[in-house]
């Protein structure tokens, strides 16, 4: 067996580490991997084309953009911020922690599309967190705002990942069941999904602890 | 029947409109190459099913070249003045939240309920990729509601959407490109190579070594592939079932669940999972390309350790 195809991974690692344009790096890595695995240029083009065709759904978040763009021109983010700012007792920690809990619980019920980076983080969570972080009319430093937004995005991802795997009809659970079944081990989806619970609880506790420390640091 | 093809057409029309506006936007220093980028992408969405795969593949490479050579730039957008924004926010109030919540709720409603509706035997919504189709329907309805609430023109929605899309730039294409790379990796047998490297070089007859290798293998392969779904079959078939279940009599159900979750820790750590870790950087206007990854790292690493301990306790 040849180790040559692994060169593509090297391209990705170096490209991302050097912060080259990621689109270029990824396509270059695909070409290198294909050539190293003995594919002809034509086969590589076909692989790229079919990959694009079958994965177009990954680009569909852009359908959300006209709605968001319009509402933002009419003050959506300002409204979300003002709404939190009026509630003085709702601190940054409470905003982020409630979002984490809600996101994890709803995802565990299979309601994964209730939230998302375009659906809720940009229009609602980020402006709310920013408003909660500056009680009164204080101004956030550029750095603190950057950290806040990144943490809002991270909180959505963590809530989603460690909630959705508890849902029995979720793709991951069905995939595990399918792989096992093809090797003669028959399990019920529920049997698999329940074992995700301890890690999901750990994820909530660990991230809640980090949010607590993060909130304290930002608000100082 | 409303299916994926309709939703792709919708996205294609939006992209084509963005391309036309970009071509004519004199405030954009690279308006022709930027228009070309969005135009090519629009073609991919509109004609992706009828174009031969070779042509689509060449298009993907051209897109990456335009992006990589800095050919994709944003035009200058005149922001709405702060006092006017605040006045509008005050006037419309919670009404502004309605379209945002509608997107989520309608996606759910269509995916769960309406998809069962049938008109003379044909389902109203295609059963293939229902959630994605539902998202398309939800965005359309919610856009109409948003236009109604703000009494804005469709042109203003298009410009607002274009502003956001230009701010995201080539990162909008990245999740797609990474999925393409994932499929090339799969064809080249990268996963099998890595998992055989793991099994050949470690003393797997030792239970602790095998279990640790399983967890690390899931995390690392997920980081390479950008997706725990792609990593799981490789590691489960290469290491989990033959070594841990057969030789060490591990309990199969927790082994699968905890292995997958070790993979999820990897998803939090890799730029390859672009839709979670790179698109938000662009969407939130962050300067550091790795800001979201850094925010996640100190949750993901202790969580990986907890998950590893659970693997030892439960399997």
Image: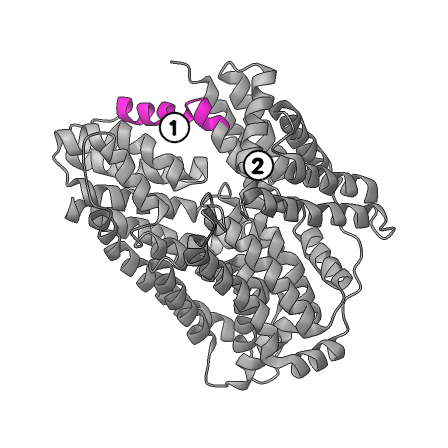
- Camera-nearest residue between A61 and B279: A61
Which circle, 2 or 1, is nearer the viewer? 2
Q: Is residue B194 magenta?
A: yes
Q: Position of residue A170 (x, y in %)?
A: 35, 49
The region drawn magenta spans B184-201
Instruction: Specify the principal SS of the magenta part.
Output: helix
Would you say residue B285 is visible in this rendering?
A: no
Label count reads 2
Residue at the location (44% across, 35% down)? B224
Badge 2 and badge 1 both on one subunit = yes
Is B138 situated above or below A102?
above
Q: Is residue B81 left or right of residue B8?
A: right
- Camera-nearest residue between A75 and A33: A75
Q: Position of residue A121 (x, y in %)?
A: 53, 63
Q: Is residue B236 left or right of residue A28?
A: left
Q: Residue B177 bears which disc, if any?
A: 2
Q: Residue A88 bears which disc, if any?
A: none
Q: Earlier in the sequence, mark 2 or mark 1?
A: 2
Label 1 lies in what chain? Answer: B
Residue at the location (57% across, 72% down)? B98
Q: Secondary structure at mark 2?
A: helix
Would you say residue B159 is visible in this rendering?
A: yes
Q: CA distance from mark 2 to mark 1?
A: 18 Å
Residue at the location (25% across, 56% down)? A197
Q: Position of residue A99 (x, y in %)?
A: 43, 68
Residue at the location (61% across, 42% down)? B173
Q: Is residue A181 left or right of residue A62?
A: left
Q: Secondary structure at mark 1?
A: helix
Q: Is residue B121 magenta?
A: no
- Camera-nearest residue between A2 and A99: A99
Q: Position of residue B259 (x, y in %)?
A: 28, 42
For disc 1, the marked residue is B191
């Amino acid at each position: 067996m040849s180790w040559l195809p692994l060169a593509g991974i090297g391209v990705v690692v170096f490209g991302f580490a050097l912060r080259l344009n990621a689109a270029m790096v990824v396509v270059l890595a695909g070409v290198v991997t294909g050539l190293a695995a003995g594919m002809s240029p034509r086969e590589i083009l076909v692989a790229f084309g079919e990959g694009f065709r079958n994965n177009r759904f990954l680009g569909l978040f852009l359908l959300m953009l006209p709605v968001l763009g319009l509402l933002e021109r009419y003050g959506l983010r300002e409204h979300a911020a003002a709404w939190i700012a009026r509630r003085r007792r709702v601190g940054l920690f409470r905003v982020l922690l409630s979002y984490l809990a809600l996101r994890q619980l709803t995802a565990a019920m299979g309601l994964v599309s209730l939230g998302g980076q375009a659906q809720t983080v940009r229009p609602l969570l980020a402006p709310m967190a920013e408003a909660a972080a500056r009680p009164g009319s204080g101004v956030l430093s550029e750095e603190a705002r950057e950290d806040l937004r990144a943490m809002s995005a991270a909180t959505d991802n963590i809530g989603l990942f460690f909630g959705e795997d508890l849902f029995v009809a979720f793709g991951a659970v069905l995939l595990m069941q399918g792989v096992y079944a093809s090797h003669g081990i028959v399990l019920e989806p529920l049997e698999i999904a329940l074992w995700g619970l301890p890690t999901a609880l750990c994820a909530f506790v660990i991230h809640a602890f980090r949010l607590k420390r993060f909130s304290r640091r930002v608000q100082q | 029947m409303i299916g994926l093809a309709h939703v792709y057409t919708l996205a294609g029309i939006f992209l084509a409109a963005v391309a036309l506006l970009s071509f004519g936007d004199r405030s954009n220093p690279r308006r022709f190459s930027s228009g070309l980028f969005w135009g090519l992408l629009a073609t991919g969405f509109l004609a992706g099913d009828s174009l031969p795969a070779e042509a689509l593949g060449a298009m993907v490479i051209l897109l990456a070249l335009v992006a990589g050579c800095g050919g994709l730039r944003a035009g200058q957008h005149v922001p709405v003045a702060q006092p006017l924004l605040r006045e509008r926010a005050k006037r419309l109030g919670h009404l502004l939240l309605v379209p945002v919540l509608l997107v989520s709720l309608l996606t759910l409603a269509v995916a769960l309920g309406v998809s069962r509706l049938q008109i003379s035997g044909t389902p109203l919504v295609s059963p293939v990729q229902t959630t994605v189709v539902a998202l398309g329907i939800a965005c359309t309805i919610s856009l109409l509601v948003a236009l109604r609430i703000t009494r804005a023109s469709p042109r203003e929605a298009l410009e607002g959407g274009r502003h956001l899309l230009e701010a995201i730039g080539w990162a909008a294409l990245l999740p797609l490109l990474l999925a393409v790379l994932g499929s090339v990796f799969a064809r080249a047998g990268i996963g099998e190579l890595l998992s055989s490297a793991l099994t050949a070089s470690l003393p797997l007859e030792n239970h602790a070594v095998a279990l640790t290798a399983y967890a690390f293998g899931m995390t690392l392969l997920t980081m390479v592939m950008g997706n725990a779904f792609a990593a799981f079959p490789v590691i489960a078939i290469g290491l989990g079932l033959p070594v841990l279940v057969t030789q060490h009599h591990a309990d199969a159900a927790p082994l699968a669940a905890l292995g997958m979750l070790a993979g999820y820790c990897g998803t939090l750590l890799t730029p390859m999972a672009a839709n979670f870790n790179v698109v938000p950087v662009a969407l939130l206007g962050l300067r550091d390309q790795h800001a979201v990854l850094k925010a996640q790292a100190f949750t993901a690493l202790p969580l990986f350790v907890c998950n590893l301990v659970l693997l030892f306790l439960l399997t």
